[in-house]
Amino acid sequence: MTDKPKILCFAGSLRKDSLNKKLAQLAGKLAEQAGAETTFIDLKDFDMPIYDGDIEAEAGLPENAKKLKKLMKEHQAFLIASPEYNSSISGALKNAIDWTSRPEPGEKSLECYTGKVAGLLAASPGAMGGLRGLVTVRSILGNIGVIVIPDQIALGQAGDAFNDDGSLKDAKKQETVGKIAARVAEVAGALLTPAVAAK
């Protein structure tokens, strides 16, 4: 393979000191070690209204939705760290998916999702680590054409889980995040190879 797979890393939380942002950044670093090219973004930089069909009909997609969609289209894979809100997906992540899944003129349906690869992670101060929320995230992404790898991690007691350098104190959990990141890079790279060969 001559090109590195490009992975977009982000969290479904808007909070400045989000544990999930830390986890997404760690996953991105480990994906780079596995041979991928990664980009970390903060959804807080892509502020947009709650999805409303009337807004879309009258004005099209918000500019930040267009910017986010463009980034998604430029990457072959996603590493998403999703917090659990009331046993489900966060509103910020769901809204970002709702807007970016909408086609613009000349685009195919779900163009920035179909055939992409995703790895899922979650972090929470609670014991379950956000596990229940990942069920919903996996279901949504699978239904819009994303290849979601089976491996995932729900990091419990995450408030005390990180070292100052962003790594995890628990070596086994650090290894699990690394395996998820490497697997996403591997699958995305394998899917990228035919496209590269066809150039």
Image: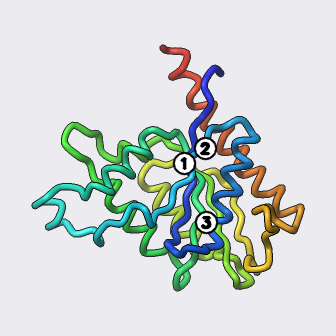
Q: Give the secondary structure at mark 2.
A: strand
Outermost residue, right direction?
A: 171
Which of the 4 image quarters holds residue 21? bottom right
Q: Give the secondary structure at mark 1.
A: strand
CA distance for labels 3 and 1: 13 Å
Q: Residue at x 32, y 56 (%)?
A: 65
Residue 33 in picture, x, y percent from top left: 76, 41
Answer left or right for 32 relative to 109: right
Which residue is disc 1 drawn over?
8
Answer left or right for 105 relative to 198: left
Q: Nearer the viewer, residue 41 or 134?
A: 41
Quadrant the N terminus occupies: top right
Residue 72 in picture, x, y percent from top left: 44, 46
* Residue contact at pointers 2 and 1, CB within 8 angstroms: yes
* Residue contact at pointers 3 and 1, CB within 8 angstroms: no
Residue 22 in picture, x, y percent from top left: 66, 65
Above or below — where is 98 with respect to 105?
below
- Residue type marked 1: Leu
Mark 3 Cα-neighbour bin, 10 Å: few <14, some 14–19, many ≥20: many
Q: Residue at x 75, y 63 (%)?
A: 166
Which residue is disc 3 drawn over?
21
Residue 199 in picture, x, y percent from top left: 48, 14
Q: Which mark is residue 168?
A: none
Which of the 4 image quarters holds residue 191? top right
**Mark earlier in primary sequence (3, 1):** 1
Above or below — where is 162 with respect to 188?
below
Q: Nearer the viewer, residue 137 or 12?
A: 12
Which of the 4 image quarters holds residue 5? top right
Answer left or right for 127 relative to 105: right
Q: Residue at x 79, y 67 (%)?
A: 164
Mark 2 Cα-neighbour bin, 10 Å: few <14, some 14–19, many ≥20: many
